[in-house]
Image (tube, grey):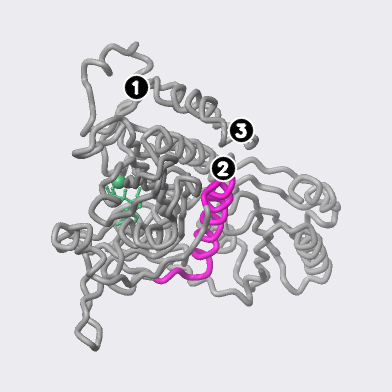
Amino acid sequence: MRLSRYFLPILRETPKEAEIVSHRLMLRAGMIRQEAAGIYAFLPLGLRVVNKITAIIREEQNRSGAIELLMPTIQSADLWRESGRYDDYGKEMLRIKDRQEREMLYGPTNEEMVTEIFRSYVRSYKDLPLNLYHIQWKFRDEIRPRFGLMRGREFLMKDAYSFDVDQAGARHSYNKMFVAYLRTFARLGLTAIPMVADTGPIGGDLSHEFIILASTGESEVFCHRDYLGMAPPEADTNFDDAAGLQDIVDKWTSLYAATSEKHDAAAFGALPDDMRVSARGIEVGHIFYFGTKYSLPMNAVVAGPDGTLKPVHGGSYGIGPTRVAAAAIEAGHDEAGIIWPEAIAPFKIGLINLKPGDSAVDAACNSLYARFQGRGVDVLLDDTDERPGGKFAKMDLIGLPWQIIVGPKGLADGKVEVKNRRSGDRQLMSPDDALALLG
Ligand code: ATP
Ligand code: MG
């Protein structure tokens, strides 16, 4: 993308309403625009990040065997009356009437709808297990929408729903999602720690929140230091191997990790001093086994081998891609701006033309730009007339992992400067070497 033809509305001033760094930087970097409290437009740069996040989530959901569909944002109130949640949900639910006076709502989640789809088609245990997911906008009329994308009212969610004949099957489905989440967050370039979460009235140990440590996090969390360096499961993990998956989950749940709601001060206190991490955290994912909570009232049953009908066992599994974008900034920034993990950066490289109009500099930039594009690398070429200082500041602000700086002086020696945004390291090298390094 050439910056001269792009839409990147950078703000010079720090917006006053933004209390946390991710919100400030997203507004300043021209990624999002608030349209109403907790409701944002995604500007082109912000959309690129969200699309990179959802692409990785999708790949890992698919790898685990989950199947993508797309359910609507608007739902019928009747569905929610069947499960009994229509009244329970309270003011967080945005309720709407259509022109026929039918009661509708903007979905805050999709358990009811996916259960309705399931019961309409699936009859036999032979069709299980099944895990259906979608990536769709949700609306929750949060009492205090704040912190930008961190706690929006309209936000994107990947929500998956598993169906199994019994609890053993449901545990396998749960473990698939657990492992998929470990891989997903690692690929996103984030350290997300699975922490025991509340299971509500159902009990059991099948609920985990995936938490990114950041000083602005809303939850107080406690964990073993080893979580900060654990390697995620491999891409060739066999998701059909129930015992193998259980081993992975056991390994990841054997160390202490809990949010304040589930905190056990004695167990935490028993850890060696240097292994105790107590910090604040951001919930980016939540997985949950809820048994027959929806299948019983909604009559989602399958016939077992002996023909008897049994309600299916369900679980739901959410990740908030828009919250993930904000959390990545909370976990990765400095005074100059954002520092994106490479996997979700809007572009991999910012190519800075220090002297547009200089034919040698223009030619070198155009050539590098075309050759990177040819290799499928996302490059943002700053070919504008802005002064060098402004260009450097802008590139640092938007946080692309690499900068290639091309000016007449360096080029006279056949060199461009390659800067790593995270380390700040700079190296002079030929354009060919820059291409070999980053292409
Ligand atoms: P929280 O405790 O933060 O209110 P929740 O427990 O209500 O979240 P879930 O229903 O578990 O959220 O939703 C799954 C995921 O959706 C969360 O882990 C989070 O990543 C995302 N999410 C939930 N609420 C919001 C929101 N208001 N804005 C942005 N993302 C959200
Ligand atoms: Mg949650």
Can residue 47 be found in the magenta stretch? Answer: yes
Name the residue rendered at 59%, 49% in the picture.
Answer: 343
Q: Which residues are magenta?
A: 41-66
Question: Residue 425, labelled with which disc?
Answer: none
State the image coordinates of residue 228 (x, y, percent, origin top left): 46, 28
Q: Main secondary structure of the magenta part?
A: helix
Q: Are marks 2 and 1 in contact (CB under 8 Å)?
A: no
Identify the residue position indicated by label 1 in the image.
256
Task: Give the Cα distance between marks 2 and 3.
Answer: 11 Å
Residue type at the position of mark 1 = Tyr
Q: Secondary structure at mark 2?
A: helix
* Tag nearer the camera, 3 or 1: 3
Identify the residue position indicated by label 2 in the image.
187
Residue type at the position of mark 2 = Arg
Please determine whether, in this image, residue 241 is positioned above or below residue 145.
above
Task: Give the Cα distance between marks 3 and 1.
Answer: 23 Å
Q: Secondary structure at mark 1?
A: loop
Please determine whether, in this image, residue 389 is positioned above or below residue 336.
below
Q: Quadrant of the N terminus?
A: bottom right
Q: Are marks 2 and 3 in contact (CB under 8 Å)?
A: no
Please determine whether, in this image, residue 129 is positioned above or below residue 90.
above
